[in-house]
């Protein structure tokens, strides 16, 4: 959570709304913010911390672990048309990589704006692909891993 | 932190099924008692919901996902407060 919060300025620049959610109550969120998060990130976590009491929202998103009673690490990118563009789900032991999240947002924003597609590991400024009959069998001419 | 508000007095709705899914069993029955099925899929419309939230500097307030329609949204689930993410 703190790692994502540290990149808040970057999310703001990209026009992204970040929402964090766990099965904890809003009261626990407040105390976590005061006792710990505000000491990791200056000013605390700046985005809303949502409470998924009972895990129903997590269940709808396929990330609720019924046995443990918690939402596992699921992350979804939703575009301005309200379509889910990407999801990544990890079991709790491994934290995520917010840089990859930022990369994916930039790629989806580029794709949505231009109609181009982005190859593996694409970063802004790098070559994109223009899908069509002319590209079939010729990707090797314009892109290599 | 003075001046924070509690806007979470009324209960929130949790997951909000799309109109087609809720049409059949609705008719005034409590939809919140139904078993929640996984509806979120990549490439599909996001499942809407309303949840209580803590917002830094503001206090407690309900947040509805579709209130942010028209913007890019990152929705992050995590196992629990006081764990690393």
Image (tube, coloured by chain):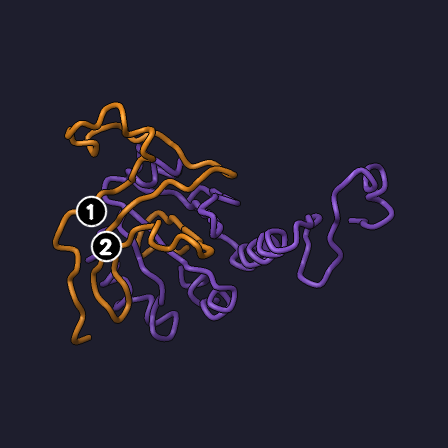
Chain letter, colour purple: A
Chain designation of label 1: B
Q: Position of residue B9 (x, y in %)?
A: 12, 54
Q: Residue at x 83, y 50 (%)?
A: A142
Image quadrant in which the C terminus of chain B is located: bottom left
In this rendering, is residue A92 above or below B4?
Answer: above
Q: Residue at x 30, y 51 (%)?
A: B64
> In this figure, what is the number of numbered marks?
2
**Is A139 positioned to the left or the right of A13 in the image?**
right
Chain letter, colour orange: B
Mark positioned earlier in the residue sequence (1 or 2)? 1
Residue, disc 2: B62
Q: Position of residue B52 (x, y in %)?
A: 23, 52
In this rendering, is residue A2 above or below B3?
Answer: above
Question: Considering the numbered disc 2 on the image, is that residue within a helix, a strand or a loop?
Answer: strand
**Is A36 positioned to the left or the right of B75 in the image?**
left
**Is B64 positioned to the left or the right of A124 in the image?**
left
Q: Are marks 1 and 2 in contact (CB under 8 Å)?
A: yes
In this rendering, is residue B13 above or below A5?
Answer: above
Residue, disc 1: B12
Q: CA–CA distance between discs 1 and 2?
A: 7 Å
Observer-nearest of A87 and A36: A87
């Amino acid at each position: 959570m703190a790692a994502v919060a540290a990149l808040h300025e970057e999310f703001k620049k990209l026009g992204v709304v970040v929402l964090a959610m766990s099965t904890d109550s809003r009261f626990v969120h407040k105390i976590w913010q005061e006792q710990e998060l505000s000491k990791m990130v200056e000013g605390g976590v700046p985005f809303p911390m949502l409470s998924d009491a009972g895990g129903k929202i997590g269940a709808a998103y396929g990330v609720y672990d019924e046995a443990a009673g918690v939402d596992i690490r699921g992350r979804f990118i939703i575009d301005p048309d309200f379509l889910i563009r990407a999801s990544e789900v990890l079991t709790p032991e491994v934290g995520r990589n917010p840089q990859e999240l930022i990369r994916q947002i930039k790629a989806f924003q580029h794709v949505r704006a231009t109609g181009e597609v982005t190859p593996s590991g694409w970063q802004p400024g790098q070559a994109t692909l223009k899908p069509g009959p002319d590209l079939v069998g010729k990707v090797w001419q314009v892109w290599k891993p | 932190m003075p001046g924070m508000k509690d806007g979470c007095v009324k209960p929130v709705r949790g997951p909000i099924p799309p109109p087609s899914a809720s049409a059949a069993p609705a008719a005034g029955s409590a939809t919140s008692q139904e078993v929640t099925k996984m509806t979120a899929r990549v490439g599909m419309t996001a499942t809407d919901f309303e949840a209580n939230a803590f917002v830094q500097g503001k206090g407690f307030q309900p947040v509805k996902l579709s209130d942010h329609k028209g913007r890019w949204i990152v929705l992050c689930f995590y196992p629990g407060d006081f764990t690393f993410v």
